[in-house]
Amino acid sequence: MEFSANDIAALLKGEVEGDGTVSVSSISKIDQSQPNTLSFLSNPAYTKYIYTTTASIVIVNKDFKSDTALLCTLIRVDDPYMALATLLDFYVKSKPVKVGIEQPSFVSSSATLGEQIYLGAFAYIGEKVEIGKNVKIYPHVYVGDNAKIGDDTILYSGVKIYSDCTIGKSCIIHSGAVIGADGFGFAPNAGEAYTKIEQIGNVIIGNNVEIGANTTVDRATMGSTFIRDGVKLDNLIQVAHNVEIGENSVMAAQVGIAGSTSIGKNCLIGGQAAITGHISIGNESKIGPQSGVMSTLKPNSVVLGTPANDFKATMKAYSIIRNLPQLREEIIELQKKVKRIETNE
C-alpha cells in the first residue's frame, strides 16, 4: 500500500513541509534510507543523515531547524518516536487478520473459546481453559488446564502457558516464552541431596504486558507470581517464583530476579542486571546494566555496579579504577625518590 505525506500527516496530526502529494510504500532507517520510503529523525546524533537521506518523507520534531535545503518532504510532529510507533501500529493492523481454527490442533471439550479467535496448527488447549475474544494463538502453543487468556492477546509460536495461569487483555507473548514453570524450590536433607518443594501457585499477568522470546516467569510456590499492567520484559529474562513486578516497569534482556522479590512501579532495569531474592525495589528506581542488587532499594534509587551502589558514587569509583595503572607508576617513582633521599642521608 502507498500513502502520501498528506495522508500520513493527517494520521499523525502533523504538519507537512514540502510536497504533500509524494507517496511512500515502506519505512527505512534514516542512515540506511531508500527512495520511496518514510524515515524519521528522533535522536539528535542522527541529524547529519537528514542532509543525505534518499527517503522521500522524514518525520521530524516541530522545532527541527535545517541548516540547508532538504530534498525530502518533512512531517513535523510533537514527538517523532511516538509518531513512528503510531504509524507502525497502523501498518501492522492494516494487514489481513488471521481467524479460525487450523488442523491438526487439540481443544478440550470443556474449554471456552471467544469470538474471532485464531488457533494455529498443532496448538493444544487444555481442560477448562478460558480464551477471550480476538485472541491469536499461533502454531505449537500449549495452554494448560484452567488457564485464562484475555481478549486481544497474542501468543506466538512455541509459547507455553502452564496450568492455572492467567494472562490479561491485549498482551503479547513471544516465541519460546514459558509462563508458569516450577519455581526453583529444593530443600536440602541429611543425605546431602535435595528434596523438591512442589510449586502449587500460579502466575497472574495483567493487561497490556509484553514478554519477549525465551523469557521465563515461574509459578509461585504458594499464591501467585504477579506481572502487573503495562510491564515490558525483553528476551531471555528470568522471573523467579513469587516475584511481583509493578505497573509499567521495563527490563532489558538477561535480567535475573530471584524469588519473592518485589519490583515497584515504573522501574527501569538494564540488561544482565541480577536482583537477589526477598528484597524490594522502590517505585521509579533505575538499575544500570550488569548491576548486582543485593539489598532493598528506596523509591527513585539510581544504582550501578556489583554490589549495586549509588550511580554517581559508582562512576567516581570507576574513574579511579581507570587511573590505577598511572597511580601505580607514580607511587613506584615516589618510592624510588624516597629511597634515594634516605640513601643520601
Image (tube, rainbow, N blue to C red):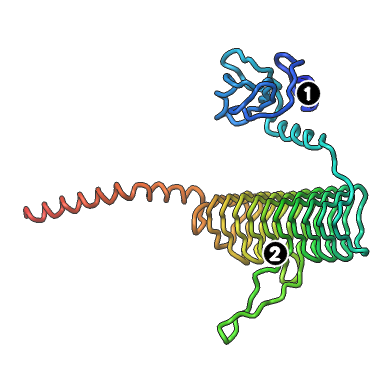
- Say which amino acid is labelled 1: Phe
Image quarter where the C terminus lies is bottom left
Q: Quadrant of residue 163?
A: bottom right
Q: Earlier in the sequence, mark 2 or mark 1?
A: 1
Q: Quadrant of residue 159?
A: bottom right
Label pair 2/1, CB-CB below 8 angstroms: no
**Residue displayed at 89% across by 65% down:** 128
Residue placed most toward the observer, 144 or 47: 144
What is the CA distance from the residue labelled 2 to the residue labelled 1?
Answer: 45 Å
Relative to 341, say whether 295 is above or below. below
Residue 125 lies, in percent from the top left, at: 85, 60
> In x, y percent, where is residue 337?
15, 50
The residue lying furthest to the left in this view is 344
In the depicted structure, whether residue 268 falls above or below residue 256: above
Quadrant of the image occupied by residue 122: bottom right
Q: Position of residue 17 (x, y in %)?
A: 70, 16
Q: Residue at x 60, y 12 (%)?
A: 69
143 to the left or right of 248: right
Q: Residue at point 66% right, 77% down?
A: 196
Q: What amino acid is at disc 2?
A: Asp
Count neighbours of disc 2 (C-alpha within 10 A) and say few if under 14, some if 14 to 19, many if 20 or more.
Answer: many
Secondary structure under badge 1? strand
Considering the numbered disc 2 on the image, is that residue within a helix, a strand or a loop? Answer: strand
Between 334 and 177, which is closer to the camera in this rendering?
177
Residue receiving disc 1: 3
Q: Which residue has dot 2 on it?
A: 218
